[in-house]
Image (cartoon, rainbow, N blue to C red):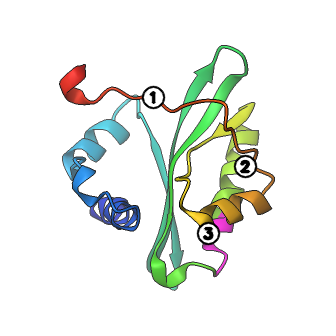
Amino acid sequence: MVPVLELIRELAIYEKEEAQVKTTVADLERDGFGEYPLFYVVLAEKDGELVGMVFYYYSYSTWKGKVLYIEDLVVTERFRGMGVGQELFDFMREEASRERARQIRFHVLNWNKPAIKFYGKNSVAFDDEWIQCKLEKENI
């Protein structure tokens, strides 16, 4: 789980939010590898080196049914632009199809132009109608 947490931190650094990472190895082990895992992780390797991951889970839409939600798709900086992200994204499409999900959902930061361009090439519809909302721990 340490490599997964390292990739999570690498993404947080890229997104200029490293201080927001509160997840620990113990959290990942407890929440992802019990009888009812809350998430799944697929790792990407090149020549035995970890180069990326996709971190995902399933949710349910009252309008659409089963939804595959991509929490994070990360490719290490050195391997960006080499097709790793596309392989991971294609895997998610295949997984959604296998699991009969009716939709794949995820978020992308509005300033992350390389990711927006990548998703645009993959027929992703960008939604400017819905506002993302959240409650932090201190307000729960």
Query: What residue is pinned by disc 1?
Result: 133
Which of the two discs, 1 and 2, labels the residue nearer the N terminus? 2
Number of marks present in the image shown: 3
Query: What residue is pinned by disc 2?
Result: 93
Q: Horizontal and vertical percent for residue 6? A: 31, 66
Q: Horizontal and vertical percent for residue 41? A: 47, 52
Q: Residue at x 48, y 84 (%)?
A: 78
The answer to which image quadrant residue 81 occupies is bottom right
Q: CA distance from mark 1 to mark 2?
A: 26 Å
Instruction: Give the number of the mark in front: 1 or 2.
Output: 1
Q: CA distance from mark 1 to mark 3?
A: 24 Å
Location of the C terminus by quadrant is top left
Q: Most prominent secondary structure in the magenta stretch?
A: helix
Which of the two discs, 1 and 3, labels the residue nearer the N terminus? 3
Q: Residue at x 75, y 49 (%)?
A: 124
Magenta run includes residue 62 = no
Q: Please report the bounds of the magenta region as a residue range.
A: 82-87
In the image: residue 128, left or right of residue 20? right
Instruction: Give the number of the mark in front: 2 or 3.
Output: 3
How many residues crowd around disc 3 within 10 Å: few (fewer than 14), some, or many (20 or more)? few
